[in-house]
Image (cartoon, rainbow, N blue to C red):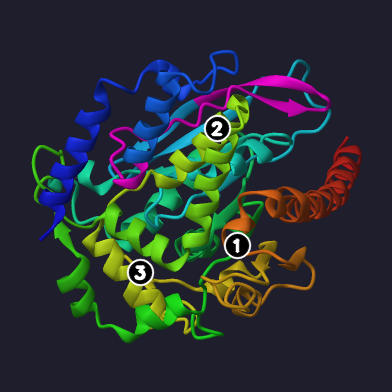
Amino acid sequence: MWYAFIDAQQRLARAMVGGVLTESASMPSAQAGWLSPNHAADAFSHWLLRSTCAFERTPPFAIHSVAVDGGRVSVDESVVASLPLGALLRFKRNLPTPPTETKPPVLLCAPLAGHHSVMLRETVETLLEERDVFVTDWADARDVPLEAGPLSLDDYVQALDSFIGTARAFGSPVHVVAICQASVPALGAAALLAMDEAAAIASISLLGGPIDTRLNPTVTDRFASSHTLEWFHDHVIDIVPPPYRGAGRLVYPGFIQQAAIFAAHPERQLRLEADYWSRWLAGDMPGAQRALRSANEYAAVLDMTECYFLDMLRVVFHEHLLPRDLWSVAGRRVRIAALRDTPLCTIEGDSDEITGAGQTHCAHALCDTSPMRPARQLTIEQCNHYDLFIGPRWRDAVHPGLREFWRDVEHAASEVCQPRRAASGSANRRSA
C-alpha cells in the first residue's frame, strides 16, 4: 500500500536535515542567542522530523539523576531482559545511604499503542523519586525479523509474565502499573500468575485501561467496534519494505496511528508545538529544550504487528472476552477472579476521551476484590487521558494517589508478617 512511499518521504526528510541538525540542535544553549542561524535551522529540522514521523532513532530516556529527600541522586539505566518483542529496562537509584526500609519497585507496563515507551519519561522520573522502576520497552515491529513469529497478543501477555519474573528476581514482589491499553495484557498476565502462585506481585494499578469497552463507549470504542476485522486488515495493514530487519512483516504502521491520534486529539499536538515555539521565540532556550524533548517523544512512533493489532481489536472491542471471562492465552483460560487477594487500584480521568467512565473501575467487580485486601478507586477531576500519566494532574493527583495506595499495601503486608514472626519465635522457644 503506502508504507514504501511514506518511508521514502521520511528518508528524504532525514536527508534534508542531515547537514543541518547539529549537536547544538538537540541541546540549545541559553547563551547562544535565540535568533542564531543554527537555532533557526534546528527548529525547522526538528519540526520536519516530527511532522513526517521521520526520527530514525528513538529519543533516549536520559534520566541521569532525580530529586530524592531534598537532594539529587544519580540513576543507572540498564537492560535486564530482552525478547524479540521488547526489552525490560531497569532504572536504579544510587542512594548515598541504604534506606531504612526497602520499598518494592514499580514495574511500569507501557502501552503498545503506537508510541515508544519514552513518552512515559516524565512518569518514570516521578516514580523514581520514591522507588526504583522497571519499564517495558516494546520493539518497533519493523525491526523484528519474520523468524521471531507473528507476535500476537498472547505473546505480549507471556512477555509481561516473563518480565514480572525478571523484576521479582531482584529481591521483592513488584507494584505493577499498567497504562491505558497495557491494562488488558497486564491484568491477564497477573491473573495467570495468581492462578499459579498467590502474592506473585505486590499490587496492580490500572490507569485509564479499556477493561470493558461496553461501558460508556467513546468515539474510539464505537469506531473500533463498528468496523470489521477484515475492514481494518484491508485499510490500515501494510507490509514493511526493505532494508528494515522486519521486511515482509505485516504491520499497523506508526505513521497511520500518529495521524489517527492527531485527528482525534489535535489539541495535544498543537499544545506541545505552541509550548515549544513560544518559548523559542521568547528566547527561553532551557524551557524550549524541555518542550522540544516532550514534542519529540510524543512524535516517536512505532509499528505494531498485524496479529497483535487485530487481536486487540477482537479481544477488547469486538468480543469483550476479558469482562465476559472467556479470554484464553496460549490455550489457557484467564481467570480474573484469581486476583481476588491481590491489592488493586484503578484510576480514571473524568474527562478521558479515549477510555469511557467505568471501563477501568469495573476491574474491581471482575476480580471480586477481597474486602481484606487494600483496594482503591480514584476518579481524577479535570483530567483527560494523557493527564493520567503526564503533566500536572499526573504529578499532583494521580501519583500521590498511587503513593498512598502503595503505603497501604506495604503497611498491610507488614502487619501480616508481624504475627507470623511472633508465632515463629514462640515455636522456636518451645522447641528449645
Q: Which of the image's four quarters has the N terminus? A: bottom left
Lateral position of residue 395 relative to residue 411, left or right: left
Q: How far is mark 3 from mark 2, CA to CA?
A: 40 Å
- Residue 32 lies, in percent from the top left, at 54, 14
Q: Nearer the viewer, residue 53 or 36?
A: 36
Q: Is residue 286 left or right of residue 219?
A: right
Give neighbour class at mark 3: few <14, some 14-19, many 20+ (Cα, 10 Å). some
- Total marks placed: 3
Residue range of the region highlighted in magenta in the rendering? 50-77
Give amino acid for label 1. Leu
Lower sequence index among marks 1 and 2: 1
Which residue has dot 3 on it?
312
Q: Secondary structure at mark 2?
A: helix
| SS label for mark 1 | strand
Residue 68 drawn in magenta = yes
Q: From this view, report whether residue 224 is shown above or below residue 237.
A: below
Residue 154 visible? The answer is no
Name the residue tied to disc 2.
Answer: 280
Q: Are marks 1 and 2 in contact (CB under 8 Å)?
A: no
Q: Position of residue 308 (x, y in %)?
A: 29, 62
